[in-house]
Amino acid sequence: MNQDFSNTYFPNRHTVVLFLPASPGSGWYLKEIAGVPFLLRNIFALQKLGVEKLVVWTDESVREQEIFLDLIKTDRRLQLELNWVDKTSFSSILEASSFLIFDGSTLLNECGSEMIQIDDDNSRAFPEEMMQCLNNKEVYFLMPEGLEQPERLQDGKDFCEAEERLLKSCGLNNDSFMDRLITRFVSRRLTSFFLKTSFTPNQITFLSLFIGLVAALCFFRGGYEMGIAGSVLLLLSAWVDCVDGEVARLKFMTSEWGAKLDIVSDNIVHCSVFFSIGMGLYFSTGDSIFKYLGMLAVVGSLTSFILLSKTILGQKAEATMKLSLESFNKKISDQLANRDFIYLLLVLAFFDRLDFFILLTAAGSNLFVIYLVWQKKKATSA
């Protein structure tokens, strides 16, 4: 029997047990997958699913257990309560009536796992002593959706394949067409590199911001070559901008502050680029219209961000706001965060038509503001 679960289902209904079979070699559970030790990755995934108390049954040696504990107690990301047991001490938790078991030698995907009731076939993955203790109890185990049996990681190849699956799954549901087609393809390669470094997600955000501001400086200088250089650097900035979120999700380092920093940095880069393109065209042609178009593009982009700031930054909607307006703002904010314009900018830069881009941006961003205001008035008067 399969069951769905939510983030509050585990701690309210089950005693959750993480079973760690004896590993093929020393340090096996400490081997990193996408920048996080194997054991910690599964514990963090359970924590993310809502587990507040976790029982760990391990067949590992006492020395290995001590290493695990030394690793875990120093990690500030860990918030759940851990209790270590073996076959002699497991009886201390048997007062519970419902248990949920996870095989710690497999990789838990918190976004695609299901609860399956234990039967004679799937119980073979767990120690006989454990199953005997749980006789006449309601017992389930966790496994990836669509698999008949959990797939244990048994060699280096398994670890590499698991990391590749994680990298492919770390995008966002609201990714744009070009994000899915190109940006994520490139950013995953960069993420694979940054996972091997000590860079934090916020440091990567600042790196993206720096590259974006250098791109704006290139545009500000004007000229065909500087336009190409600025477009390429802005493209690199956007790729790196994807990396901070991917690293944060893969390393369980997401935070409200990091999300806000990312959005604010994006808008600083965009406004700087729009202003600099206008000024660069003004310096190159002497036509002051481009200076004003650049300013208009900044005003439109900044005003749109301000109007949607509560939604974009993930804050709660105001109590007086209609549900229809809140839903509308979420859809619009996805479009505002769209990075696809960077590819159009690169193409136009190669054809030396940045004048067309700044005209389109100045007009489009301000028409968008008018549309936002109109929709807000329409929703509030409904």
Image (cartoon, rainbow, N blue to C red):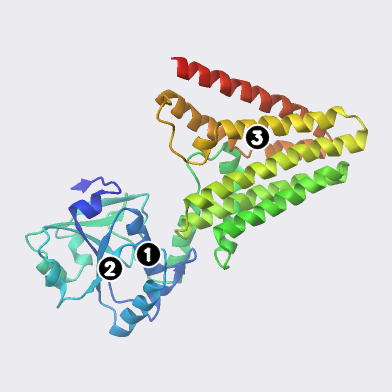
Of labels 3 and 2, earlier in sequence is: 2
Expressed as whole percent of the image width and height from the top left, the position of residue 236 reads 69, 51
Q: Residues within 10 Å of mark 1 (few under 14, many from 20)?
A: some
Secondary structure state at the residue bearing disc 2:
strand
Farthest left residue in view: 136
Secondary structure state at the residue bearing disc 3:
helix
295 in relation to 55, above or below: above
Residue designated by label 2? 82
Pick whichever, 366 or 343, lies toward us: 366
Give the position of the C terminus as an image quadrant: top left
Give left or right: position of 281 versus 160.
right
Give left or right: position of 156 versus 364.
left
Which of discs 3 and 1 lies nearer the camera? The answer is 3
Q: Amino acid at mark 3?
A: Leu
Question: CA gap, disc 1 to disc 2?
Answer: 10 Å
Query: Which quadrant holds residue 349?
Result: top right
Expressed as whole percent of the image width and height from the top left, the position of residue 159 reads 44, 66
Q: Amino acid at mark 1?
A: Leu
Pick whichever, 230 or 268, lies toward us: 268
Residue designated by label 3? 302
Secondary structure state at the residue bearing disc 1:
loop
Of labels 3 and 1, earlier in sequence is: 1
Expressed as whole percent of the image width and height from the top left, the position of residue 304 reads 61, 31
Q: Amino acid at mark 2?
A: Leu
Expressed as whole percent of the image width and height from the top left, the position of residue 175 reads 53, 40
Q: Residues within 10 Å of mark 2 (few under 14, many from 20)?
A: some
Give left or right: position of 72 versus 377.
left
> Image point 38% across, 67% down: which residue?
40
